[in-house]
Image: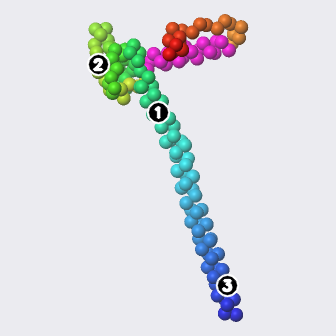
Amino acid sequence: MLMSLHTFAAAAAEQEAAQSGAMGLVSILPWVIVLIALYFIMIRPQRKKEKEAMLMRSNIQIGDEILTIGGIVGIVVRKGEDTVVIETGGDRSKLRIRIEAVQENITAQEEAAKEKKEKANARLTPGAPKKENSKKDRDHSEE
């Protein structure tokens, strides 16, 4: 009889411990779900935008028209490791700015929009002849 009470008490203690562990998991689960949701809603898109901006800044070439974060529009005349010299205004003033201050590459955006429009037109007119590769495309293919 004493053995039965001891076994019963041990089984009850194990069951209570399992229930309290499950209750602890259930109380933490909403916080885990909220953190996962925040990652996919806020952190991941921000990292994606930062990578795209970093790629855009590294692909800036001499002759590109850029827009700075301060709203200055200019043409790149020299590119250093972490700075860019742009020419702006009617009197051809030159400004040296940090590469992080470049907000967008206007030339690259115009080219991308032009290519997108050409692809859309090509889909609408399937019998149209294909255009020849541009000089820029030929230069890249020769390398």
The dominant secondary structure in magenta is: helix
The residue where tag 1 is placed is 51
Q: Secondary structure at mark 3?
A: helix
The residue lying at 66 percent from left, 85 percent from top is: 7
* Nearer-the-camera pick, 5 or 30: 5
Give the farthest residue toward the bottom: 1
The residue where tag 3 is placed is 8
| Lower sequence index among marks 3 and 1 | 3
| Amino acid found under the numbered disc labelled 2 | Leu
> What separation in Å lies between label 2 and label 3 (alpha carbons)?
84 Å
Indicate the quadrant where residue 129 lies: top right
Q: Position of residue 47 (x, y in %)?
A: 48, 37
Mark 2 surroundings within 10 Å by alpha-carbon count, few (fewer than 14), some (14 through 19), many (20 or more): some
> What separation in Å lies between label 2 and label 1 (alpha carbons)?
26 Å
Count of numbered marks: 3
Asked whether the beta carbons under mark 3 and mark 1 sit within 8 Å of each other, the answer is: no
